[in-house]
Amino acid sequence: MMTTSTASGKIILFGEHAVVYGRPAIAVPVTQVRATATVTDAPAGSGCTLVAQDLGEAVRLADAGADHPLALVLRLALDAAGIAREPDWRVVLTSDIPIASGLGSGAAISAALVRAALTHAGQPAPPETVSRLVYRSEELFHGTPSGIDNTVIAYERPVWFVKGQPPESFAVGQPFTLAIADSGIPSPTKESVGDVRRAWEADPAGYEAIFSRIADVVHGARRAIRDGNLAAIGALMNVNQQRLEALGVSSAELEKLIEAARGAGALGAKLSGGGRGGNVIALVDEQNAAAVQAALLAAGAKRVILTQVGTAAIR
Ligand code: MEV
């Protein structure tokens, strides 16, 4: 028997970092890129092998240490499925989501793995369960995650997210298109989240004030998205970017991409996710999409994905 499950990437539109401190954030799935997990029954007595195909790595579950992220996810899933004894499985993982780029590659691989393991074990894999198990692994390996990545990936729909609360969906008055540009600079979220935490510890009042100003932007963005007011969405992206710069998570390379997108006619642009490196997102329309994409590539983006928010394509 063979079971294959997938999970999409994600992008944060508004509110990254502040979301770790209880403020709301808005995120959407990016379905053009996906992680895939395939579970196949292996000969009896052969045990469970985890194969990370893209990394050329294979590890027997019995030999993997407690600090092996994928083994941890699989153990959590087996536990949730009520499987006490190691099953005879070969589990193969692949992904076309760029690593450490803000597209949620780690959470997506974990989500695909949890889905495939639960399904192969004959158990349901509802989004709440997938989200909860992926969060537990994120918590161990990424410090103090808000839970937004596992949530948007597990539910695979646009979410209005507040830490510790069930995700809400939000209305989209008019579909809009984002150009997602990969700076090619790895951006381990754990590091930028850790740096913001240290800065917040040194100046709690100053940082709390910035987080609250980011929350104002996120509330405004929800209204602008509901009203289909693209000019307002773009302007709010620009304001959110300024506030991320104030938090210290932007970089010269990201700002070069942001300026290039705005210069080519994007209605707004900002970094997305942890920052420093990773992705920049720009709000484009039919007229300027090609020019913005070209400008981003000319300014050093390694690749640009166009994704639509508010259409069936992203559900
Ligand atoms: C990472 O995708 C988003 C951050 O806000 C971290 C988190 O929410 O856990 C930077």
Image (cartoon, rainbow, N blue to C red):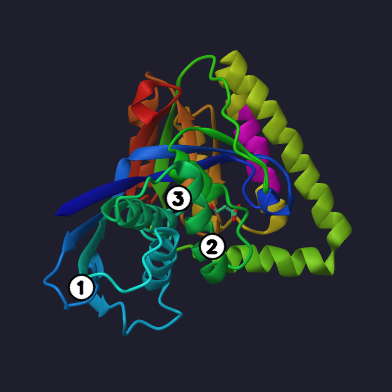
Residue 288 is situated, as x and y percent measured from the top left of the image, at 40, 24
Mark yes or no: residue 219 visible: yes
Per the rendered image, the range of residues in magenta is 235-243
Residue 59 highlighted magenta (yes or no):
no
Q: Is residue 216 left or right of residue 123?
A: right
Residue 240 is situated, as x and y percent measured from the top left of the image, at 66, 40
Q: Residues within 10 Å of mark 2 (few under 14, many from 20)?
A: some
Choose between 106 and 81: the one closer to the eye.
81
Q: Which of marks 1 and 2 is in front?
A: 2
C-alpha separation, residue under disc 1 versus residue under disc 3: 26 Å
Rendering quadrant holding ligand 1: bottom right
Tell me the kind of residue under disc 1: Gly
Residue 240 highlighted magenta (yes or no):
yes
Q: Which residue is drawn at 58% across and 22% down?
A: 225
> Mark 2 vs ligand 1: CB under 8 Å?
no
Choose between 44 and 66: the one closer to the eye.
44
Q: In this view, does 269 lie to the left or right of 242?
A: left
Examine the image and state in which quarter residue 66 appears. bottom left
* Residue behind mark 3: 130
**Chain-order first, disc 3 or disc 2:** 3
Label 1's element?
loop
Label 3's element?
helix
* Residue behind mark 1: 56
Q: Which residue lies furthest to the left in this view?
A: 43
C-alpha separation, residue under disc 1 versus residue under disc 2: 25 Å
Q: Residues within 10 Å of mark 3 (few under 14, many from 20)?
A: many
* Residue behind mark 2: 136
Image height check: is 285 above or below 273?
above
Image height check: is 59 above or below 290?
below
Discs 3, 2 touching: Cβ within 8 Å = no
Tell me the kind of residue under disc 3: Val
Q: Tell me the quadrant of the picture where the N terminus can be found.
A: bottom left
